Image (spheres, coloured by chain):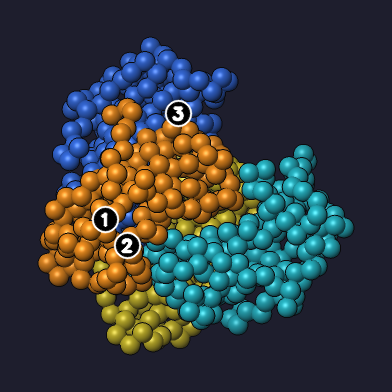
Chain colours: A yellow, B cyan, C orange, D blue
Amino acid sequence: MPRVRVPVPMRWSDVDAYGHVNNAAMLTLLEEARIATFWADGSEGPAVGTKVLTAGPTATSFTLVARQEIEYLAPLDYSQEPVPVDLWVGRIGGASLEVCYEVYSPAGALCAKAATSIVMVDAATGRPRRLADSERGALEALLEAPIEFRRR
Amino acid sequence: MPRVRVPVPMRWSDVDAYGHVNNAAMLTLLEEARIATFWADGSEGPAVGTKVLTAGPTATSFTLVARQEIEYLAPLDYSQEPVPVDLWVGRIGGASLEVCYEVYSPAGALCAKAATSIVMVDAATGRPRRLADSERGALEALLEAPIEFRRR
Amino acid sequence: MPRVRVPVPMRWSDVDAYGHVNNAAMLTLLEEARIATFWADGSEGPAVGTKVLTAGPTATSFTLVARQEIEYLAPLDYSQEPVPVDLWVGRIGGASLEVCYEVYSPAGALCAKAATSIVMVDAATGRPRRLADSERGALEALLEAPIEFRRR
Amino acid sequence: MPRVRVPVPMRWSDVDAYGHVNNAAMLTLLEEARIATFWADGSEGPAVGTKVLTAGPTATSFTLVARQEIEYLAPLDYSQEPVPVDLWVGRIGGASLEVCYEVYSPAGALCAKAATSIVMVDAATGRPRRLADSERGALEALLEAPIEFRRR
């Protein structure tokens, strides 16, 4: 399977008074998994695919989160162990892609399934821009069937 | 329309280096809108509907977020003005409900559409429990057609 | 007393698994109290004193937090009531000021004492700049004795 | 020097609209450095020193943050590299200790100096409890001169 497994450190402050990772904090964990996978160098700005490409980062583009969907399947308890996040690309469009995730507890329970739609934006014009062939090739290396949600 | 408009204070720390409210922070704004609408008294524990009911809060139940979906339609810039969040109930199930939201900029632009599925849980057993008739009645007062997402 | 009382909304996600507002989240509450007091319009950038001045906001300056000190005196429990934060100016320097705070529970218990040192910075040069006479006058209206810490 | 160097992962959401790690988020980084050093197993509750002791974690105690002081010396820019945090024990009292930190940029610039006073609390009584000899011994292995602040 082309998916990657990203270990994402949890923080004590992600946990709310119920003792579980807060529902919104879970999206922050997804964001960190996405950055670890795709950003070549965050300090120079995000660029989808640059880390899986031979090309370097570019400040001429950035990415917008257009849509997110998440199912919480089991509470994620606090742990000092990183959270294993499986990440893959579920769809590749002209100027966009869908990132899919499965979030596990350190003990191995499936805690959440999620998907994020991302749009590539040209920094100069602020308009969506087409994925370059090199980016498309890199993203295809992570392509799997899109995640299926249970409760939609 | 039975929806309520909840003014949700934004924070400076919700804004990321792009100058917009972060995608995960947006879910925190939804959470605050939900709490303001439904919790009778957070310090005694959450209980869906208690604020729209004549009955008081109960520590015998709590609520779980089972699912969330959000479309980001326009960036939400920092402002000291509260964020207007329109909130309504889109579906009422046996032991669950769907909360729907439209998030506006203080200037009135529609920035996000979202939905949260919530399950009522019996605190003693940890199992889902049916909505009481009184809760159902209170929730029906907020019932509108479920939100329609564009990009699903 | 020239201090102002700022009602700062707490969030559910400020509370950690101990059921109290997290130690770092407390500084976010201070930041919000400071912004509510001093920023004329956050979307145009911060400017100490503009809200207590007749002059409008200016993008030609910004403020840096140089130092913070906080004593936690009692746990701050979750509440839907805003947190009352008493805020005043403890010292005014050439290019800097010290903001002092007392954080109360909604029920009136003193939960924290804190101080923040802020430096005015010229946006064009990135160097500290002297407080204008008009700013100084406005800040003096909030001047009280600096906070005294117990455990220093 | 007995200090330890803890690599603390930064998050994109720690960075505010100025492009630097937010002043309150910096305390979250300190918290994570402290937990990594001292907590034997967060999921069983915090216990100062258990990680530097042969003894295991104990649910019979917890720790309270009583005081924090921090000087911000240089902005900490976003980076995917972990933040190097030097951590040591500056003082050991009867029931308390002072944790000292120096926070560096991944490139090696000193960005912040800080200290946190922690009190050991007996979980059963809620009262401070004396450090055990074994804890004291473990903490002494990290003992250095307390941090000196410039602007106090």
Percent x, y for residue B34? 63, 61
Given the image, on which type of amino acid does mark 3 rest?
A: Thr
In this view, the mark in front (2 or 3): 2
Q: Disc 3 is attached to a residue of which chain?
A: D
Q: Is residue C128 left or right of residue D105?
A: left
Evaluate whether residue B80 shows in this view: yes
Q: What is the C-alpha distance between the residues marked 2 and 1? A: 8 Å
Neighbour tally class for label 2: few under 14, some 14-19, many 20 plus, Cα within 10 Å: some
Q: Which mark is residue D63?
A: 3
Q: Is residue A74 left or right of residue A89?
A: right
Evaluate whether residue B114 shows in this view: no
Picture residue at 23% right of the left edge, 46% below the top: C91
Q: Is residue A119 left or right of residue A16?
A: left
Instruction: Tell if the residue under mark 2 belongs to the same chain as the one under mark 1.
Output: yes
Q: Mark 2 falls on what kind of element?
A: helix
Residue that badge 2 annotates: C52
Q: Are marks 2 and 1 in contact (CB under 8 Å)?
A: yes
Quadrant for the N terminus of chain C, please.
Answer: top left
In this orientation, which residue lies closer to the viewer: D61 or C143?
C143
Residue that badge 1 annotates: C139
Q: Disc 2 is attached to a residue of which chain?
A: C
Q: Mark 3 falls on what kind of element?
A: strand
